[in-house]
Image: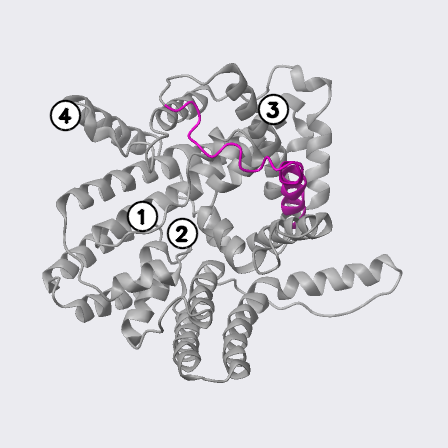
């Protein structure tokens, strides 16, 4: 079930009405409704994979209780590894089995040996990478004694399967979201209004920006041999806003819907394309994933505390693993490695935390230095996005080879002025609202007629530029 579908627009009001009719004092009943609704939401895509979520929930719920009762450290490690192996085992099989088989066959072929191993016709469960990491955070934090294990299985099921963020995040920590299922949630009108406002902005990002940019990005990437370097650069530009509008749009909708039900999810994007260096970009892009890898992989490996070799090793590990998390393709590995190369100079020169404030804070326009920093960071991000979008590594290199020719400065064969104008409008709103949690977070400070005029404009644009319904990009991850 997609957020931008008719089914969901019927589903959400029904669940919302039932949820608050149950009443704030009946926490368990509300959790039952959330769990059932979440399973319906996910099962709408393919009911067979509900058993996968249920099994993961049972395993991690059980391991949490066993971890708490075990006195022997070796036994606690055993329970932790059972959880890790079960969760990553499912993820590895469904997402990476065919990739490893194909890579193995290609390796033997490269050395002149023919290896015959059949791949499997595996359907990738939607959102498996997201809910796997979410439930893993629970057992790891219980093991580290940062969290008391829950004995409320219904609440735990609701936590694992919470429908607003089930299939594409944010990847919630058990320490943040799980306790919210155990306490009374009150209906607060102002929170609901703010939630609906964020949903509206998320829909604008997805339907108007992402889906319309996707149309041109797909045309250009799929026919890159036919276009000039300037058009190929425009294609990378369109993909950059497709993936940002798509993914951050989903996060906005998820966070906004959660607020309607009295839950607070973590922020997942913080205006990443206004970053002044790549380190700042990664503090602002997919925050829930980057902080997950930081806390559960990078820091346990030693972080940046060791010598030069350890810093380089850990940086490459976290970025390559992050790339590989996104998909079973060497393009994602190269994308991760390229970002590690971007990041390393800042880390080694101790400049990776220089830009931690809001760019041009308190000003309408950035300085020339800030504008240059944002432009160069966006440019190298564009180059990396080519690998993320390409069908394979060869496709990416050929795309870039054809981009950086003398035709880079020629007139583009494709120039959708209306879409570019929408992107410019979008960037202006994001820039003006960059100090908020999301772009129109503080719009209630302006006068009511102007505010409602803006809302109607956004709604008109959503209906005017709605094309063929497209799934969210990150569903495939």
Mark 1 residue crowding within 10 angstroms, few (<14) / some (14–19) / many (20+):
many
| Residue 166 in the image: above or below residue 401 | below
**Marked residue nearer the N-terminal end (4 or 3):** 3
Instruction: Tell me where residue 404 appears, x and y as whole percent.
Output: 71, 25
Circle 1 residue: 255
Provide the residue span drawn in magenta.
Answer: 333-361
Left or right, 168 with respect to 118, comes to left
Spatial CA distance of label 1 from label 4 is 24 Å
Task: Report whether residue 134 is seen.
Answer: yes
| Picture disc at residue 448 | 4
Mark 3 residue crowding within 10 angstroms, few (<14) / some (14–19) / many (20+):
many
Quarter of the view holding residue 44: bottom left
Instruction: Tell me where residue 140 appears, x and y as whole percent.
Output: 47, 68
| Residue 394 in the image: above or below residue 18 | above
- Residue drawn 29% across the image and 33% down it: 463
**Marked residue nearer the N-terminal end (2 or 4):** 2
- Residue drawn 33% across the image and 36% down it: 438
Quarter of the view holding residue 219: top right
Mark 4 residue crowding within 10 angstroms, few (<14) / some (14–19) / many (20+):
few
Please tell me whether mark 1 sits on a helix, a strand or a loop.
helix
Q: How is the image coloured?
A: one colour
| Picture disc at residue 170 | 2
Instruction: Tell me where residue 353 appears, x and y as whole percent.
Output: 53, 37
Left or right, 219 with respect to 227, comes to left
Spatial CA distance of label 3 from label 1 is 36 Å
Please tell me whether mark 3 sits on a helix, a strand or a loop.
helix
**Marked residue nearer the N-terminal end (3 or 1):** 3
Name the mark nearer the viewer: 3 or 2: 2
Circle 3 residue: 231
Left or right, 263 with respect to 86, comes to left
Spatial CA distance of label 4 from label 3 is 42 Å
Magenta highlight on residue 34:
no
């Amino acid at each position: 079930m997609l957020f931008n579908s008719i089914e969901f627009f019927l589903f959400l009001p029904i669940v919302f009405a039932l949820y608050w009719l149950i009443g704030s004092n009946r926490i368990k009943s509300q959790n039952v409704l959330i769990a059932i609704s979440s399973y319906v939401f996910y099962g709408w895509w393919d009911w067979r994979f509900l058993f996968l979520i249920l099994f993961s929930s049972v395993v991690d719920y059980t391991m949490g209780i066993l971890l708490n009762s075990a006195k022997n450290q070796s036994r606690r490690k055993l329970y932790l590894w059972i959880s890790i192996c079960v969760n990553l085992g499912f993820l590895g099989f469904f997402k990476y089995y065919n990739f490893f088989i194909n890579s193995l066959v290609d390796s033997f072929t490269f050395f002149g040996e023919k290896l015959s191993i059949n791949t499997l016709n595996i359907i990738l469960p939607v959102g498996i990478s997201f809910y796997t990491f979410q439930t893993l955070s629970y057992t790891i934090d219980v093991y580290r004694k940062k969290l008391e294990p829950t004995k409320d299985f219904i609440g735990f099921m609701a936590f694992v399967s919470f429908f607003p963020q089930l299939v594409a995040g944010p990847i919630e920590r058990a320490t943040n979201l799980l306790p919210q299922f155990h306490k009374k949630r009150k209906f607060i009108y102002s929170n609901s209004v703010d939630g609906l406002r964020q949903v509206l902005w998320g829909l604008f990002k997805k339907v108007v920006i992402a889906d319309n940019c996707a149309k041109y990005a797909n045309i250009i990437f799929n026919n890159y041999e036919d276009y000039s370097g300037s058009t190929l650069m425009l294609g990378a530009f369109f993909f950059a806003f497709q993936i940002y509008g798509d993914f951050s749009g989903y996060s906005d909708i998820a966070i906004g819907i959660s607020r309607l039900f009295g839950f607070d999810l973590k922020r997942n994007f913080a205006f990443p394309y206004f970053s002044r260096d790549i380190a700042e970009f990664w503090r602002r892009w997919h925050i829930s994933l980057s902080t997950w890898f930081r806390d559960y992989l990078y820091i346990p490996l030693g972080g940046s505390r060791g010598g030069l070799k350890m810093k380089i090793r850990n940086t490459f590990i976290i970025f390559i693993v992050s790339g590989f998390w996104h998909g079973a393709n060497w393009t994602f590995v190269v994308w991760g490695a390229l970002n590690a190369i971007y990041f390393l100079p800042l880390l080694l020169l101790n400049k990776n935390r220089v830009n931690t404030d809001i760019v041009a804070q308190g000003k309408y326009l950035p300085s020339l230095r800030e504008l240059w920093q944002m432009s160069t960071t966006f440019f190298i991000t564009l180059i990396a996005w080519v690998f993320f979008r390409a069908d394979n590594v060869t496709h990416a290199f050929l795309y870039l080879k054809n981009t950086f020719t003398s035709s880079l400065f020629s007139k583009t064969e494709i120039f959708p002025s209306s879409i570019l104008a929408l992107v410019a409008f979008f960037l202006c709103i994001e820039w003006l609202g960059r100090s908020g949690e999301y772009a129109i977070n503080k719009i209630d400070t302006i006068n009511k007629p102007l505010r409602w005029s803006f809302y109607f404009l956004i709604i008109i644009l959503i209906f005017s530029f709605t094309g063929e319904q497209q799934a969210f990009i990150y569903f495939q991850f």
